[in-house]
C-alpha cells in the first residue's frame, strides 16, 4: 500500500505563504525613490494606507500616479473619500530639498490629514549621535 506523504508539501506551502506575506507590503509603490536612512522603530502596516512619493526631480506621486502639488489635496480627498483618518506615508528622496517634503506635509496638514508618517530606510545613524 503506497500513499503520498503530504506533510512536506504542506510545510513548503506554509513557508512560501509566510514569505509572500512578509514581502507583499514592501511592493506597495513602484516609484524609484532613494530613501534616507534613520534608526527609528518601524510603524505598524495599515492595509488602507496611501503613499505619497517626492522624487529627486521634485515631482509628486500618489501611489504610482503622478500629480502636481497644487492638485495634491483635491486628489487625496477624492481617493480617501475625504476621510481624514486615512494613514498617509510620505517618501522623500534623500537628495530632494527638505523644503519640498515639508511643502507636501503642510498640504496634508492643511487638508486635515493627521495620520502622516515619513518613510526612511532602517540602519541610519544611532539616535542621539550626529555626523561631524
Image (cartoon, grey):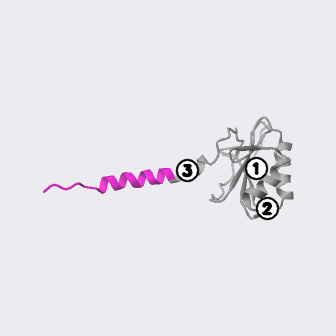
Residue that protrudes farthest toward the front in the picture: 78
The quarter of the picture where residue 112 lies is bottom right
Count neighbours of disc 2 (C-alpha within 10 A) and say few if under 14, some if 14 to 19, many if 20 or more.
some
SS for callout 3: helix
Q: Which of disc 1 and disc 3 is earlier in sequence?
A: 3
Q: Is residue 67 left or right of residue 10?
A: right
Viewer-proximal residue among 111 and 98: 111
In the rendered structure, find residue 24 and report the number of the disc placed on it: 3
Residue at (78%, 39%) from the top-left corner?
59
Q: Which of disc 2 and disc 1 is earlier in sequence?
A: 2
**Range covered by the magenta-colored residues:** 1-20
Residue 99 placed where, x, y %?
86, 43
Taken as a whole, is the magenta stretch helix, strand or loop? Answer: helix
Pointer 2 residue: 114
Q: Marks 3 and 1, how far apart in space?
A: 33 Å
Residue at (62%, 59%) from the top-left corner?
47
Q: Marks 2 and 3, how far apart in space?
A: 26 Å
Q: Which of disc 3 and disc 2 is earlier in sequence?
A: 3
Q: Is residue 54 left or right of residue 99?
A: left
Q: Is residue 119 above or below residue 109?
A: above
SS for callout 1: loop
Residue 84 placed where, x, y %?
77, 63
Pointer 1 residue: 128
Count neighbours of disc 3 (C-alpha within 10 A) and say few if under 14, some if 14 to 19, many if 20 or more.
few
Residue at (79%, 62%) from the top-left corner?
114
Amino acid at each position: 500500500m503506497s500513499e503520498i506523504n503530504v506533510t512536506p508539501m504542506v510545510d513548503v506551502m506554509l513557508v512560501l505563504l509566510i514569505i509572500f506575506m512578509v514581502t507583499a507590503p514592501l511592493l506597495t509603490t513602484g516609484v524609484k525613490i532613494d530613501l534616507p536612512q534613520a534608526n527609528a522603530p518601524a510603524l505598524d502596516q495599515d492595509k488602507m494606507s496611501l503613499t505619497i512619493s517626492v522624487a529627486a526631480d521634485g515631482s509628486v506621486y500618489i501611489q504610482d500616479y503622478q500629480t502636481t502639488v497644487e492638485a495634491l489635496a483635491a486628489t487625496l480627498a477624492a481617493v480617501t473619500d475625504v476621510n481624514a483618518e486615512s494613514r498617509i506615508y510620505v517618501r522623500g528622496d534623500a537628495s530632494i530639498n527638505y523644503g519640498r517634503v515639508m511643502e507636501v506635509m503642510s498640504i496634508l496638514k492643511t487638508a486635515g490629514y493627521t495620520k502622516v508618517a515619513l518613510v526612511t530606510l532602517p540602519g541610519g545613524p544611532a539616535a542621539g549621535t550626529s555626523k561631524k
